[in-house]
Image (cartoon, helix red, strand yellow):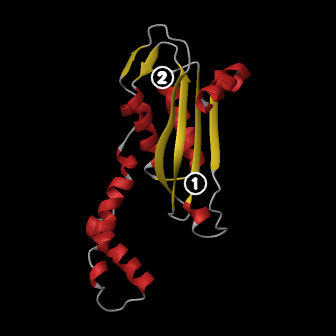
Amino acid sequence: MITRDEAVDAVEKLVRYVESVDGSLREGLIDTPLRVINSYEEIYSGYSLQPSEILDSTFNGEDYDGIVLLKNIEFHSTCEHHLQPFGGKAHIAYIPVDRIVGISKLARLLDCHSKRLQNQERITKSIADDIMEHLKPLGCAVIVEAKHGCMTCRGVSKQNAFMTTSSMKGVFFDNAEARNELFQLINN
């Protein structure tokens, strides 16, 4: 396991590489390595979260059998391929059988998965899998739309490209009517 001091030293080496500096760092960069490590603790806080702990507190669904949808949930993540930021919004839906979960838990579940080194497909699938495992709904749908730094600031430099991923489970996969109702709710 790398220590915090070793991580700070590693960032200093990267800063020196970028700046082509052999001697002392200029004033504005002296504390940059420590600031980067401090920011990483927040940016990558998803590693300290567990989906089972987030979804462990449920409520009686009181026979509600319609779609539960939390839409336009903002998120930020980091691409595991280039360490570039990506972010956008997610829509998370499920149809309960017996148990429901507080809506903040859906946003926390998104944070749990997005605040890690990631790819968008894994975030999308992991959220759906967690909801199916812990809530056991009739179905679950997760749609994630994101703009990727690795597409906008390097490589092909496409500024307005958004990537959309989806994971449909249960009734949302099997039933076109359920999918259509979901899309209508998202687009309202």
Q: Residue farthest to the bottom?
A: 23
Choose between 64 and 81: the one closer to the eye.
64
Say which residue appears at 43% left-offset and 50% top-offset.
Answer: 115
Q: Earlier in the sequence, mark 1 or mark 2?
A: 2
Query: Separation of disc 1 and disc 2 at Cα?
Result: 30 Å
For label 1, the SS is strand
Q: Position of residue 45 (x, y in %)?
A: 36, 50
What amino acid does circle 2 point to? Leu
Q: Position of residue 183 (x, y in %)?
A: 65, 29
Above-or-below relation of 21 to 116: below
What amino acid does circle 1 point to? Lys
Q: Residue farthest to the front?
A: 188
Count every numbered label the image shows and give the total.
Answer: 2
Q: Position of residue 73 (x, y in %)?
A: 48, 39
Choose between 11 and 160: the one closer to the eye.
160
Which residue corresponds to mark 1? Answer: 147
